[in-house]
């Protein structure tokens, strides 16, 4: 993102200068107004840009919300599918259990039928064997037996009875054997039917197991799909969170820029008012100057430009700190510098000269100024020399232009040897460069 902060110091500067009553001149005020207007334009551009960015982020957020909704629908559909499949799986599981129970029962029945059949076969065989044995015995031992039995008959009636009894005996044996055979066949049929049933159940079981395994596979697939969609959803949610954060940052920035804009609008209005006042003052000053010139031609009064001041440090013209607002090198405070600092190589103990004839009105150590001399040049104009290593004049002394007033040093609040030089009009500091030629 483009850096869009208006440097805080610029704001502070314009604020400070607006609030202060010290805007040094009309030119400065106009320059300030230009600067504030430029800042306002820049802030407006930034605001437009932020609004465009917000629109874009809003569009992205809408798209994300749609995407998220789609994913949620997808997830709900998959969830439904999963529940359906799981319920099917449960039904199938129950079916499987029931079928397995049925199989167990059928197999138990079959076991009994097989035992019954064995018994029936055994009995039929035994009967057959008994019948055969009896017939053989009759044949072997009693070929005569039936005959003897018949011959022993006491009467025809008895004979008939005996014949009848023999026939009944043989018929009974035959009947028992046939019944045995029938019973055996019946059991055999039942056994076959039961085996059929077992096969069918086994087939059914196989089918259900197949179905179960298919459902389990389906369940796994759905779970995998669900996981995938959940992951996608969480990715979208992350993107959403980021965009929302960006949106709130943009909104905060928008608020901040609007506040700045309001502040700058206020400043701008104040500056305009100040410029009007200064313009008026300037006009009055010009009128006064005109009047002075007329008076000059009349032979009295003197203007500042005709004071004929000289530069206070011969051979040193470097200004290390100009007149006006600056960050103080020691206090780091932003404040008005009431004069100019003149410095240079080996300036220590070099003489500072009176810039014009005058009377010394102060010559002493003066707090942060250190060793200080003030000369009154008349007409409300004074010059001040500070941080001296020693003072060469005394209060009340008349000095001539060029006389040494002090030796340059670093007394008072100073970072190194330099001359702090001021010019004041009726006690108010003015830019010395308006008085002394550099
Ligand atoms: Zn200074």
Image (tube, rainbow, N blue to C red):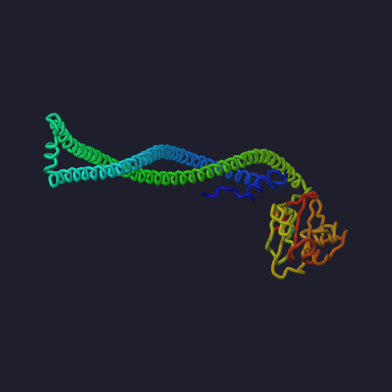
Residue at 22%, 45% (x, y): give it: 126
Instruction: Using residue 221 as the reference point, say whether residue 428 is left or right of it.
Output: right
Q: Quadrant of ligand 1?
A: bottom right
Of the 4 image quadrants, the one containing the C terminus is: bottom right
Pick the residue in front: 71 or 36. Answer: 71
Residue at 15%, 36% (x, y): give it: 166
Q: Position of residue 63 (x, y in %)?
A: 44, 39
Residue at 61%, 50% (x, y): give it: 7
Q: Residue furthest front?
A: 154
Q: How many marks?
A: 0
Q: Can you tell which quarter of the image residue 186 is in?
A: top left
Pick the residue in front: 111 or 315. Answer: 111
Q: Residue furthest bottom?
A: 346
Q: Position of residue 24 (x, y in %)?
A: 70, 48
In this rendering, the answer to whether 334 lies above or below 204 is: below
Pick the residue in front: 261 or 139. Answer: 139
Instruction: Using residue 401 as the reference point, say whether residue 41 is left or right of it.
Output: left
Instruction: Using residue 246 as the reference point, say whether residue 149 is left or right of it.
Output: left
Pick the residue in front: 421 or 198. Answer: 198
């Amino acid at each position: 993102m483009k850096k869009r902060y208006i440097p805080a110091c610029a704001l502070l500067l314009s604020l400070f200068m607006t609030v202060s009553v010290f805007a040094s001149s009309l030119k400065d005020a106009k320059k300030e107004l230009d600067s504030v207007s430029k800042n306002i334009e820049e802030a407006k551009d930034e605001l437009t840009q932020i609004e465009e960015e917000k629109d874009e982020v809003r569009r992205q957020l809408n798209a994300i919300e749609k995407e998220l909704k789609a994913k949620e629908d997808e997830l709900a559909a998959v969830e439904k599918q999963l529940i359906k499949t799981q319920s099917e799986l449960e039904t199938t599981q129950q079916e499987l259990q029931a079928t397995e129970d049925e199989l167990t029962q059928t197999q138990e029945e079959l076991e009994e039928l097989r035992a019954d059949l064995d018994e029936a076969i055994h009995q039929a065989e035994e009967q057959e064997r008994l019948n055969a044995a009896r017939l053989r015995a009759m044949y072997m031992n009693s070929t005569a037996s039936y005959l003897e039995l018949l011959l022993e008959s006491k009467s025809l009636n008895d004979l008939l009875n005996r014949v009848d009894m023999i026939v009944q005996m043989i018929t009974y044996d035959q009947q028992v054997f046939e019944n045995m055979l029938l019973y055996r066949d019946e059991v055999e049929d039942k056994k076959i039917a039961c085996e059929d049933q077992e096969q069918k159940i086994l087939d059914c079981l196989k089918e259900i197991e197949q179905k179960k395994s298919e459902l389990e596979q389906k369940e796994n697939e759905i779970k995998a799909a669900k996981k995938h969609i959940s992951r996608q959803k969480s990715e979208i949610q992350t993107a959403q969170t980021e965009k929302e954060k960006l949106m709130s940052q943009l909104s905060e920035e928008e608020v901040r820029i609007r506040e700045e804009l309001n502040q700058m609008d206020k400043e701008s209005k104040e500056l305009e008012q100040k410029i009007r006042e200064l313009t008026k003052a300037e006009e009055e000053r010009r009128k006064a100057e005109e009047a002075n010139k007329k008076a000059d031609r009349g032979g009295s009064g003197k203007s500042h430009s005709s004071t004929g001041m000289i530069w206070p440090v011969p051979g040193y013209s470097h200004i290390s700190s100009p007149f006006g607002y600056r960050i103080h090198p020691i206090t780091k405070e932003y404040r008005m510098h009431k004069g100019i600092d003149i410095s240079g190589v080996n300036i220590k103990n070099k003489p500072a000269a009176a810039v014009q004839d005058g009377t010394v009105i102060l010559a002493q150590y003066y707090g942060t100024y250190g060793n200080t001399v003030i000369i009154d040049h008349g007409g409300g104009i004074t010059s001040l020399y500070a941080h001296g290593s020693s003072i060469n004049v005394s209060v009340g002394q008349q000095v001539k232009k060029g006389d040494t007033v002090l030796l340059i040093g670093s007394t008072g609040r100073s970072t190194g040897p330099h001359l702090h030089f001021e010019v004041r009009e009726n006690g108010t500091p003015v830019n010395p460069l308006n008085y002394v030629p550099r």
